[in-house]
Every structure is written in C-alpha cells, then in structure tokens.
Amino acid sequence: MASEPTTVTITGAGGQIGYALLFRIAAGDMLGESRPVRLRLLEIPQGMRAAEGAALELQDCAFPLLHGVELSDDPVRAFEGANIALLVGARPRGPGMERADLLAANAGIFGPQGAAIGAVAADDVRAVVVGNPANTNALIAASAAEGVPGDRFTALTRLDHNRAVGQLAEALEVGPGELDGVTIWGNHSATQFPDAAHATVRGEPVVEALASRLGGLDAALRWLDDVFIPRVAKRGAEIIEVRGSSSVASAANAAIEHVRDEQLGTGGRTTSAAVVSRGEYGVPEGLVCSFPVVSDGDGYRVVEGWEFDERGRARFEASVAELVVERDAVEALGVL
Ligand code: NAD
Ligand code: LMR
C-alpha cells in the first residue's frame, strides 16, 4: 500500500537551484521510489512567476510519486505540516556588500522561516540550509524554531564533500564510489578544511595510494596541501568564474544526497554535513559546523575520535574561528 505523502517545502523554488531540485525530488531521487511527495514552493513575490512556471512543468511530467504542488509567498502556509524543508532562497552578496550586510539580510529571511517551521511544521521536520552563508543561516533558523530540537537543522557541505571525492577519484584514477572517509570540516566557505587523512580507497589509506602514484609521502602531502585543499575550498569561486554564475545542478544534487542519506541512512559509510555542535572536537556548542557524519536513517550523528595532525588541527580551528565571528556578527544584530 502506498505510504502517506511526505510534505517537502522548498524555499527559493523559482530560482536556479530550485528548478534543478524540483524535478528530481518529484521523480523519487531524494526519498526513493516508494515514498510519494507533496511539494510546497515558497517564493517572494518577485520569484513567484518562475515558481509557477516550474509547477506547470511538474504537472506536465505526470510523475507518479507527485501528490500535488502548492505555491505560497507566506512561510507559515508553506511550512505547514512540512516533514522536510530545503532552505535554498537567500540573498546573495552583491557589489559593495560587506559580510555583515549579507548576514543582516539573511537574518531577515532565516529568522522568520525558522520561526514558521517551529510554529507549523510536522513534529518530525528536518531542515537543510543551502542558501549562503549556509552554516550561519542554519544557526539563525535553528535558534528561531521554538520547540524543534537543534539537531533537526543542518547546513549543506555535501557539495564540498562531493567535490573532494571527485578530485581524489581523478587523481587516483578510481571510481568515486571506491572512496570512503573523505571529510569536510568547518564552514562552507574558503576556510573549510577538506581532509583526506582518514580516507580510504578500496580499503587502502588514500595518503598511501597517493604516495605510490606521486613518488613518495612528501609528494603526496604536498599535493594535498597545494592542490587538493585549495581546489576544493575555492571550487565555488572557480564555478562562478567559468560558468558566470554559481553552481546549480551540482548543488541540487548535493542537497538531494544530503537529505537522502539523512532520511534513509549512509549504509555504514561516512559523509560530511554541517550539524549543530554538541562540543564535538572542541567546537563551541551551538555552532553549525561540518564534521564527518553517519546516519542510520534517523538524522546525522557526528563520527567522533578522529585525530588531526598539527596542520589539520590549525586549518580546522581557523574555519571554526570564522564560524564564531559569523555567530558574533548575528548576535550583535540581535538575531540570536
Ligand atoms: P537564485 O538567485 O537563482 O535563486 C534564489 C531564489 O530565492 C530566487 O528565486 C529568490 O526570489 C528566492 N528568494 C529570495 N528570498 C527569499 C525568501 N525570503 N523566501 C523564499 N524565496 C526567496 O540562486 P540559486 O543559484 O538558486 O542559489 C540559492 C542560494 O544557494 C544562494 O545563496 C547560493 O549562494 C546558495 N548556494 C549554496 C551552495 C551550498 O553548497 N551550500 C551551493 C550553491 C549555491
Ligand atoms: C558553491 O559552493 O558553489 C556555492 O556556495 C556558491 C558560492 O558562492 O561559492
């Protein structure tokens, strides 16, 4: 017997990532082929026509799993009964804007959306923030969502994770599925720490596999420091430069994989997600920080006990320090 439809709310649904998300979710890529979905599209009035157009096209796809599409510019209506929320709509940084301006603009979006989730979403709601600055927007939304446990809010670093896997797979000439244990630590920003120290390829440590290919351990560590880490951390900027606008299909794909693994489980493998810190690895409680995580199908859990070398620890701490600065900036705005 078909199960009750899962209500999925997507904010910024009329935007680029929204357009790349909707059809894949409706086709079953996110929750599997046995879970029907009901889509709720939240937009601001300026984005409503684009969202309406996407809704018409969804109808024209006649997806068997799709049990209705509703549009709204009111967060309370859009999040009513939501089981899953993808918070994509955000104000991007424009010319002449400072980080504090962006944080202020987005606080005005993610505070009310978090409050609406707290007020009207389903008891089992889980929300992932995609809109930048994703970690701190998730912190704002989680703080505003009264009655919703903090661990229901996460931010997307799966795109960075997939980028890291892609770079390693190319360097080692293996399939991406043969790698495990790759991790993104910290913020979804250029300070993030993409880490291969615990990664394995076909069960062999990645660092050893790189050393065999590159002519020794020193060469492998140099490649990780000078090529891999900056390439992954600055990939968003590279995509903007080459495409002329920020990543879309890869971001939507990462968001779908993030929710799928959170809801259906990681099958014993690790992935990366930014979750509300409970003090793991010395990260101040409450910050939304990226860690290695696993899921049994009931939310992400941080994998603890992994060790850093001195340089890795310094990189991680620098990214966490940036998260503290962002949190302090929104606190100063009176948002938290
Ligand atoms: P876009 O400009 O194409 O779309 C954003 C949409 O959000 C627009 O349609 C806009 O009308 C809507 N919107 C703005 N404020 C809203 C609000 N208060 N409520 C509902 N909708 C609102 O942008 P995009 O390319 O789809 O990117 C969306 C966000 O995702 C950006 O912040 C971008 O930087 C971020 N992003 C994050 C990652 C990641 O890995 N975390 C990757 C790529 C992009
Ligand atoms: C990305 O990582 O592609 C996005 O966060 C967009 C950006 O601004 O880099």
Image (cartoon, rainbow, N blue to C red):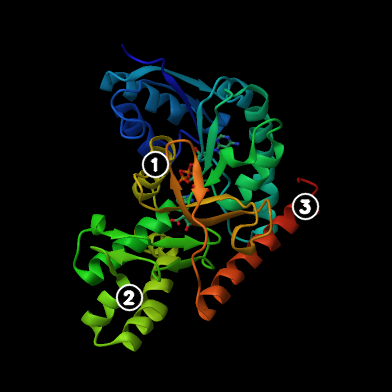
Question: Is label 3 in a helix, a strand or a loop?
Answer: helix
Q: Nearer the viewer, residue 321 or 265?
A: 265
Question: Which callout, 1 or 3, points at the residue further toward the start of the chain?
Answer: 1
User: Is the CB of mark 2 within 8 Å of ligand 2?
Assistant: no
Badge 3 is on which residue? 331
- Apparent side of residue 330 relative to residue 57 in the rendered image (left or right): right
* Residue 184, horizontal then vertical, whole percent: 46, 61
* Residue 109, horizontal then vertical, whole percent: 64, 39
Q: Is residue 182 visible?
A: yes
Q: Nearer the viewer, residue 152 or 54?
A: 152
* Residue 92, horizontal then vertical, whole percent: 55, 50
Badge 1 is on which residue? 261
Question: Which callout, 2 or 3, points at the residue further toward the start of the chain?
Answer: 2
Classify 10 Å Cα crowding around label 1: few (below 14), some (14-19), many (20 and above). Answer: many
Relative to 13, say whether 180 is above or below.
below
Q: Nearer the viewer, residue 134 or 6?
A: 6
Classify 10 Å Cα crowding around label 2: few (below 14), some (14-19), many (20 and above). Answer: many
Badge 2 is on which residue? 207
Question: Is label 2 in a helix, a strand or a loop?
Answer: helix
**Quarter residue 325 falls in:** bottom right
Cα separation between marks 1 and 2: 26 Å
